[in-house]
Image: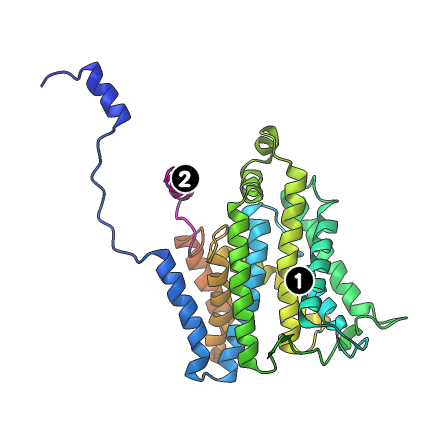
Amino acid sequence: MEPATPQDAARNVLDPPVEKQAWRPWRPPARVVVLAAVLVAFAIPLADPSQYALRILATIGIYGLLATGLNIVVGRAGLLDLGYVAFFGLGAYTYAMVASDHFHIHFPFLVALALSTTVAALAGVVLGIPVLRLRGDYLAIVTLGFGEIVYLVLLNLDRPINITGGVAGILEVDHPDLFLFTADSLVANYYLILVLLLLSVFAAHRLVASRIGRAWVAIREDETAAAAVGINTTSAKLWAFGIGASFSGFAGSLFAALQGAVFPNTFLFTQSILVLAMVIVGGMGTLWGPLIGAAVMIVLPEVLRDVGALRFVIVGVVFVVLMIFRPFGILGARRPERSLRRTIDRTAQ
């Protein structure tokens, strides 16, 4: 066999030989799967499901919106927020205050929605300012404390002026009224939540693909290196806290409109853990993972309701097995380098 010439070596470097790839099962394109799932979601009410099933689906939509927002903070920016439920509560209570008989104020739905989202976003920025220098466990503890403070305020701010209603909460919240569309039934609320959820996921997708989205990923991987290449880490973190909180406030508004009432015991620390589990189970940092995680975390306990308290043991075992075989979540890459390789391939195209 003749030795390889320098020309052959150079040719191999510039045009490497094509390696034989292992056989892989055919998978439908992601866009086809997403389109089919959206069509099925819109067609579900046409099958005349029970009120119970529709309420479960509406709840999945609201928690999917919550998980999408937390995925921006935790999955993209790498900021562990254990007080995320606080923004959920602020959004729900703001909507209830300006769209009910509590203060005899009845703002239009879009105005109340924008106001509650803005209040939650501002609260996220206020939380982000003092914790900019904190990382890891310290950041988690501070955000946890913020969530508990908000819960206690909602619980006790009924005296000397009744602002939040205390333990009794705020009742008779207005139904969403959007132009000629009034969501005065569960089916109408379901469609409203579904449409707003899809718009929110699209917005999250555009954010991730933007310059600020790439800055979040850089901060998550190595904040020091990100600052060294010129990324304004302070501004990027504040954007992450503010935008993530706005998603939560947005979901809180829909939750208040769906339930028709808000109570402080709904916004406990366990809700933050639940939403974080949705992000992890579905696939942290992915686009559709939080929605899959929300569906699993809501549906699985309901399916096992007949077994009583044992259902929590079964759910725990399922999650342990899932984390063993899919440590990066259901839709997460099995290994980080695979996700990086796919990103490089898309960029090259």
Quarter of image, res 266? bottom right
The amino acid marked with disc number 1 is Gly
Q: Is there any visible trace of residue 308 in the rendered image?
A: no
Q: Distance between the residues labelled 1 and 2?
A: 34 Å
Disc 2: which residue: 347
Q: Is residue 334 magenta?
A: yes
Judge whether 221 appears above or below 56 on screen: above
How crowded is the residue under tag 1: few (<14 C-alpha within 10 Å), some, or many (20+)? many
- Closest to the camera, between mark 1 and mark 2, is 2
Quarter of image, res 41? bottom left
Q: Would residue 88 appear left or right of 274 to someone viewing this image?
A: right
Judge whether 256 appears above or below 226 on screen: below
Residue at 22 percent of width and 48 percent of height: 23
How far across and how far down the image is residue 214, in percent?
53, 41
Region rendered in magenta: 331-349
Which of 207 and 59 lies nearest the eye of the viewer?
207
Rendered image coloring scheme: rainbow
SS for callout 1: helix
Q: Quadrant of the N terminus?
A: top left
Q: Which residue is outermost to the front?
A: 180
Residue at 61 percent of width and 30 percent of height: 230
Residue at 63 percent of width and 75 percent of height: 179
Quarter of image, res 211? top right
Q: Which residue is outermost to the left?
A: 1
First reached walking from the N terminus: tag 1 or tag 2: 1
Q: Would residue 341 appear left or right of 212 to someone viewing this image?
A: left
Which of 139 and 212 lies nearest the eye of the viewer?
212
Residue at 68 percent of width and 39 percent of height: 234
Q: How many marks?
A: 2
Q: Is there any visible trace of residue 280 in the rendered image?
A: yes
